[in-house]
Amino acid sequence: RDGALSMRSLFASADLDSDTKSSYLQSYAKWVVGRQSAVAVHDGVDVRVEPKFEIPDGSVFAGSWCRPQNDGPGLRAITLMMYAEDLLSNDPKDDFVTSNLWTGDSSTVNGGAIKFDLDWVVSGWQSNTCDLWEEVQSTDFFWNRVTMKKAMLMGAKFAETMGDSESSATYASTAAAIDAELDSHWTGSFVAEESNRQKDGAVFVGFNNGYDSSDDRYSPVSVEVAATINVFNTAFCSEYTVNTADSAAEVPGILIGRYPGDTYANGNPWVLTTAALAQVLYRAATYTITTSAPTDEALEQFSAALNVDFPSDASGISQTLAAAGDSVLLRLKEHVGGDGGHLDEQLDRNTGAQMSAKDLTWSYAEVINAMKARDDWVAAFA
C-alpha cells in the first residue's frame, strides 16, 4: 500500500526530468514483479496481499502482522497503469510495458505485473482483509472497495489498449459489481468506512485515491463528499485538545485523525489524513470551475462543514473551497513547520508536536498530493 501510494505521488507530482522519473518507476515495477514471484510462507495468504517484505532480499516477512492486506494489488496496478499509459503514449509498443507490465503470456512474469494484480482483484475483492490501519478485519471497507473499483475501471481501458478484450470485459463487470456494494456505505448523512467503524479518516483518502472521472462517483463536490466532510469535521474538532487550542488562538483549519476513539499511541491527529482533507477541498475548488459547481444541497453541507457563507458565483465558490484547503494545510504547518521539512506519522493530541513513526513516507505522499492539487487549482483558476 504505502509503496504504491508513494510511487503514485512521485509519478504525478515530482519535478524530475522524464528519464530520472522513469528510472524510479522502472525500479519499482521490477520490485513488484519480483515480489509477485516470491515464495509464499503463510498458509492461505497469496504473496500479492502480503503486507511486508524483507529488505534487501525481498523475501516475505515471516513474522506476525495483520494479513492479508487486500488493497495492495489494486493500488499497485493503478500506479503502474499510470506509468504504462505514459510510456505507451510515446511508443505504443514500448518494450518495458510488454516485457514487465502486460506480457500477454501468463508464463512470462505471470502475464505482467499489472495484469497479475488486476486478476487478483477480480477473484479476491470480496474476501476478508485487514483495514489500511492494520488493526481490524472485514470484507466491507470503503477504502478497499473504492480503490479496487478504480483499478478495475482503469484496467478495463488498459486491457483494451493491450488488445485483450476478454480481460477488459471481466474488469468492467467487476467494477460494476464493486460499485453496487458501495451503495451500502452511504448512511444518509456521510460515507462510512465500515459498519463497525463508520467515521474514519480513511474515507477522505479513499475519496482522493479512488475517484475516477469516467463514472464521476464521489466527485469532490458531490453531496456525499460534502456531507462526510461536515460530519467528520464536527467529530474531529472536539476530539483533540490541540484543535480546540488552535481554534481559540485563531489558527485556521482542522487536524484529522484516523477515527474518533482511537487509542493507538493515545489517539492523535495524523499528518496523512489531515493532508487528505486538504486535497479533497482543493479538488473541489478545481472541479467547481472546470466541470460544475456544487448543488445547493452540497453547498449547504460545505457551508456547515467550513463555517462559511459561500458566494453564489462559481468563481467565488471555488476560491472559498481553496481557502478552506489552505486553512487545513496552515494548521498542519503550524505544528510541522519548525521541523526542517520532516513529516512524521502523528501529531500529539494535546501539544501538536510530531510523534510516532519518523519520516513516514505516506505522510510525505499525502502532503505532496495536497500541494499538487493546489497547484492544479491555481493553474485552472488563472
Image: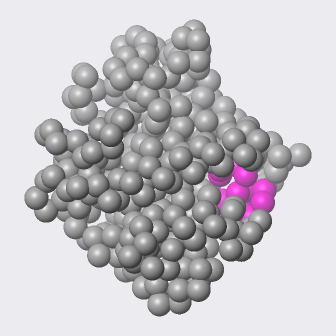
Residue 173: x %, y % from top left: 42, 85
> Where does the magenta region start and end?
283-296
Q: Is residue 136 left or right of residue 71?
A: left
Residue 366: x %, y % from top left: 53, 38
Q: Quadrant of residue 2?
A: top left
Work out which residue is located at the far left of the displayed protein and give it.
Answer: 43
**Which residue shows up at 54% across the image and 79% down it?**
159
In the depicted structure, whether residue 190 falls above or below residue 108: above
Q: Is residue 317 left or right of residue 252?
A: right
**Which residue shows up at 48% across the image and 53% down it?**
30
Is residue 294 at all visible to an observer of this figure?
yes
In the depicted structure, whether residue 216 falls above or below residue 257: below
Magenta region, main secondary structure = helix
Q: Nearer the viewer, residue 98 or 328?
A: 98
In the depicted structure, whether residue 108 falls above or below residue 305: below
Q: Nearer the viewer, residue 327 or 309?
A: 327
Is residue 347 at all visible to an observer of this figure?
no
On whether residue 136 falls in the magenta region, the answer is no
